[in-house]
């Protein structure tokens, strides 16, 4: 009896997907860090006070940090897969791991 959906993904493909997600989050981290550095010179158009500008800068830095954490998570996953294995993942795991089709 089958109790649910399981998807089989080989370790090489999974590693490729994790590396792609790490690069994606690294780009986002760099964007938010760069944006935080420009917050005072180029405040977002909807900000009206210096306090709000500083709040926006903190928010950009916080978002950059969260993206760096995600980058580290995906790098760790990519580096710790067992080679030449098939991984069975549930739909929930696929969603949590941000698995998407990677087009080269």
Image (cartoon, rainbow, N blue to C red):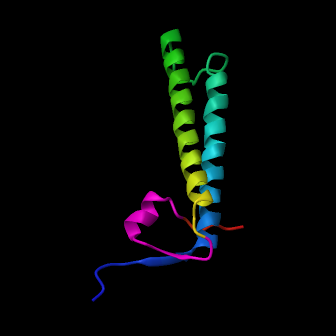
Question: On the picture, is 40 further left or further right than 52?
Answer: right
Q: Position of residue 88 (x, y in %)?
A: 45, 75
- Residue situated furthest top in the rendering: 50
Location of residue 54 with respect to 96 vertically, above or below? above
Q: Is residue 22 above or below residue 102?
A: above
Picture layout, residue 13 above or below residue 27: below
Does residue 12 sit above or below 36 in this rendering? below
Looking at the figure, which quarter contains the N terminus? Answer: bottom left
Q: Is residue 87 magenta?
A: yes
Residue shown at the point (45%, 65%) measured from the top left? 94
Residue 40: image location, x then y, percent: 63, 16
Magenta residues span 83-99
Residue 38 appears in the figure: no
Relative to residue 26, is residue 93 drawn left or right?
Answer: left
Magenta includes 61?
A: no
Can the viewer see residue 75 in this picture?
Answer: yes
x, y percent for residue 5: 37, 78
Q: Say which quadrant the C terminus sits in.
A: bottom right
């Amino acid at each position: 009896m089958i109790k649910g959906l399981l998807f089989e993904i080989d370790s090489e493909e999974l590693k490729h997907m994790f590396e792609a997600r790490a690069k994606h989050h690294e780009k986002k981290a760099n964007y938010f860090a760069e944006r935080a550095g420009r917050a005072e010179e180029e405040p977002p158009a909807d900000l009206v006070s210096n306090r709000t500008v500083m709040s926006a800068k903190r928010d950009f830095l916080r978002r950059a940090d969260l993206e760096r954490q995600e980058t580290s998570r995906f790098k760790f996953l990519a580096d710790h897969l067992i080679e030449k294995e098939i991984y069975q993942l549930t739909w929930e795991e696929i969603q949590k791991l941000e698995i998407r089709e990677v087009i080269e």
